[in-house]
Image: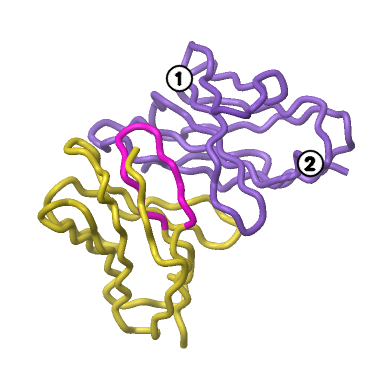
Amino acid sequence: GAVVSQHPSWVICKSGTSVKIECRSLDFQATTMFWYRQFPKQSLMLMATSNEGSKATYEQGVEKDKFLINHASLTLSTLTVTSAHPEDSSFYICSATGPPGTKNIQYFGAGTRLSVL
Amino acid sequence: DAKTTQPTSMDCAEGRAANLPCNHSTISGNEYVYWYRQIHSQGPQYIIHGLKNNETNEMASLIITEDRKSSTLILPHATLRDTAVYYCIGGYQKVTFGIGTKLQVIP
């Protein structure tokens, strides 16, 4: 149980285009979902926290207009990188908490590798 | 969230126990200690968590000191597939990842 699916796993796009990444909790309702970004040889950096039906809370330094997060249901959150540029190339990872009794354990997706040309 | 300190890297012989330490001296009374690991180019994987008592599951054991200022993750019989970066997290809601410990299991 507690499976989080992230799609796509790899995406290549041209500079200036927008890319949408989906994060789904397959067998539980996710009360909270998190979005992280990871550059090579670095740790995960939290970008934003989202709760179903409310606006996401962004970490300091993360542009909310560039990284649009929608958490429309208890099983789906999306991250849209708008007008992507090469410096946005990174490994994006989502996670979710929510299964009853799991004490806020985060269950992670497999990640999406974004390459902006 | 509590600040955690871990060694940057460790080696362990295959089949031996891997003991990964973590210092979380600023942890508060209601904050759990969580351990995750990240195998190269994958999303992190939950391993174990605890509050005060020692915990064991099918993956590992977690030993928490009585003052809760530090803990040790124990992989009882390390395999090559346990090579990963291990993260110790102190917190309740938001998880902040540090650098973690890069564990290399050696044949």
The chain displayed yellow equals B
In the rendered structure, find residue A87 and report the number of the disc placed on it: 2
Kindly report which numbered mark, 1 or 2, lies closer to the viewer in this rendering.
2
Q: Nearer the viewer, residue B61 or A8?
A: B61
In the rendered structure, find residue B5 and report the number of the disc placed on it: none
The three-letter code of the residue at mark 1 reads Asn
Marks 1 and 2, the one that precedes in the sequence: 1
Q: Colour of chain A?
A: purple
Tell me residue B93's x, y (percent). 34, 32
The three-letter code of the residue at mark 2 reads Glu
Q: Is residue A56 left or right of residue B88?
A: right
- The number of numbered badges drawn on the structure is 2
Q: Using a 10 Å C-alpha cutoff, classify the residue at mark 2 as few (fewer than 14 neighbours), some (14 to 19) or many (20 or more).
A: few
Distance from disc 1 to disc 2, alpha carbons, whole Å, reads: 28 Å
**Residue B90 position by quadrant:** top left
Look at the picture and state if B76 lies above or below B48: below
Q: Which residues are magenta?
A: B87-99
Q: Using a 10 Å C-alpha cutoff, classify the residue at mark 1 as few (fewer than 14 neighbours), some (14 to 19) or many (20 or more).
A: many
Q: Residue at x 88, y 35 (%)?
A: A15
Q: Secondary structure at mark 1?
A: strand
